[in-house]
Every structure is written in structure tokens, then in C-alpha cells.
Image: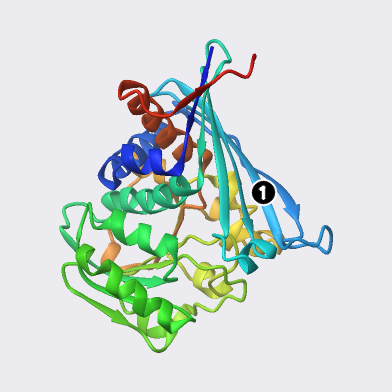
Amino acid sequence: MNTLLLSKSDIEKLISFKEIVEICDKTFQGFGDGTTLNPPKVNLNLGDSAPFPPYNASMNAMPAYIGWQDIAGLKWAGGFGGERIKMGLPFINALILLCDPSLGNFVAAMDGTSITNMRTGGQTAAALKYLFKGRKSIKLGLYGAGAQGRTQTMAISEVFDIEELRVYDIIKPSAEKFKSEMESYVKGNIVVCNEPEEAADCEVVISVTLAKDGFIRNEWIKPGTVYFAMGSYQECDYETILQADKIIVDHVEQCLHRGALKELVGQGKITAKNIYCTIGDLAVGRNTVDNLKNERIICIPIGTGAMDVAVAGTVYKKAVSLSMGTEFSFDM
């Protein structure tokens, strides 16, 4: 049986942000009802937080089974902060493999970088649907004006009118470029912030940076704010987490060992008991957030292979129907 090979350009022709938000929504529902299977990601440290090897990088193996698609797969993805950045290449590099769960045949292999960026925005937009039920517009604060800052904006604009977007990036020209490129997705004004605390004056605050120094401060996050800590490192200070009224995650076990909660878990200050619920719980109505205006909520969708595999599954099925991609036999 042949394997279908799909490039980044193929994928971008086959999927839209509207579809990605819907896919993330269905997959979160699968988490909630138990039909999405997602073991915690396995991390290979290539010097990201260790002295050896000296590559300032890491790779994750992220397997999943998606019940509503009956597809299995794995994303092999990494962030490379050394030579790759010096060459002007994107920080993230990824590949996705899809498998027929009944036969074990590898049905597709495709670029995973574009899917990673797009589904990261899609999962935020889907989560916001559960948190801001009935709302048509929001005010958005964004830390990080890179590729994922763009996909956050593009995906959220499929669900809400963005009445204002406040963006901060340590490289101000990047924020200015972001403003010019994202204006068509934002109903209101895009404000480039001079100081980081200015971007937090919003009801939804999202950080998609590579920061490790906890630069977002507890006092910036006001009652009535939902803060999405999307990065793999420590973007906010400990008090932002410890003083939150509710902590919501996409995957409990995974979030306890990576990203914003990792260091506090290591110190014994955060355990699974401190997590209010998962996004999957919200998706199936097992839990709700009813006091949003008076609470400070931190939402941590650290990223799961399930979202990547689900998007890739839809891309694969559409590619087959349109006779796109290149077939390759590994048996030859």
C-alpha cells in the first residue's frame, strides 16, 4: 500500500482556519468523552535545558488516536534555537505520520510545521468558545508577534470579532510588521505596545513566546481576564499561577511536566488537585466557568498530538478526494 506524501504548500491549499477550529472543537469533545486517546508527549532534550548535546534544541514524539476520524498518527516535532535560527529558518520543524489503525499501514507523511502553528491557534479559539459562550466580540492582548501570534489572531477571528488587539514583542519592528499583516483579521484597532504590561489590559491575554524568565507579572492580570500560557517555558511569574482562581489545561499529566506549571510542580506547590478541569471537560459540559467577570483564569493548552493528528487526518482525506500529493511505496 502506498503512502501519500504532502508538502507544506499542499496542506495550506487543503485546510482553512475555520475548518481547523471545528476540528479542534471535535477533538476536545473526544478528550471529554474518551474517544480521543493521547499519551503524554515524550521529549528528547538536545541541549534545550541541558549541557549536552550543545544544540539548544528539543524534539517531541506526540502520538494520538482520533475516534471521530478513526485515524492514528504521530507528530515528531522540535524547536531549534541554535544553528537553525542563525540560518534564518523557522524555530519549529515537524513531520506527521498517519496510520490506518486496523491494518498498521502508514497512509500519509506530511509537513507538520504549518499544522503545528495553525492548530495552536485553533485550540485557543475552540477553548474561547466554551469560556465566552454567547459572546460575539473580545478584546485581545498578545505577547509574541511571530508565526504563532499570527495564527492565534487568524483562528480567533473565525469565532469572534476582535474589537481591539494589543500586541507586544521585544523586537518592536516585528510587532509593527504584525500590525500591518493582521489588520484584515481584526475588526477594531491593533495597538503596538511600548511596555509589556500594556498588552495585559484585555479580557483575553495570550503569550506565545520563547521566554523563560517569567516576565508576565501577576499584578497585570486583572479579574475578568483569561490568560493563555501557550509557551513551552516559563512566560509568567509563579504568582500569576498560584493566585489564579481556576487553572484549566488540555492534558493534565502533560501540563504538570512541561510549560508554565513545570517548576511549581517540581517545588510541590502545584499538583493535579489544583487543576479545575480540562478543556475537554468544558467541551462536553462536565464543567463550566460561570463567574468569568470576577475571576482570573489561566488556561494552559500545552499542545497535544491529537490536535495535529486530527488536522492531518482531515488534510489526508481531502487530498485523496482531490488526487493531491505524491504517492510513494516504502516496499520498493
Q: Which residue sits furthest bottom?
A: 194
Above/below status of 98 relative to 224: above
**Residue 141, horizontal then vertical, whole percent:** 34, 72
Above/below status of 43 relative to 266: above
Name the residue beneath numbered marker 1. Answer: 59
**Residue 163, horizontal then vertical, whole percent:** 18, 70
* Mark 1: amino acid: Met
Mark 1 falls on what kind of element? strand
Q: Is residue 8 left or right of residue 204?
A: right
Q: Which residue sits furthest right?
A: 52
| The image quarter in which residue 60 lies | top right
> From where the camera sits, is residue 81 visible?
yes
**Residue 304, horizontal then vertical, whole percent:** 51, 43
Residue found at x 56% / y 75%: 237
What scheme was used to colour the molecule? rainbow
> From where the camera sits, is residue 284 visible?
no
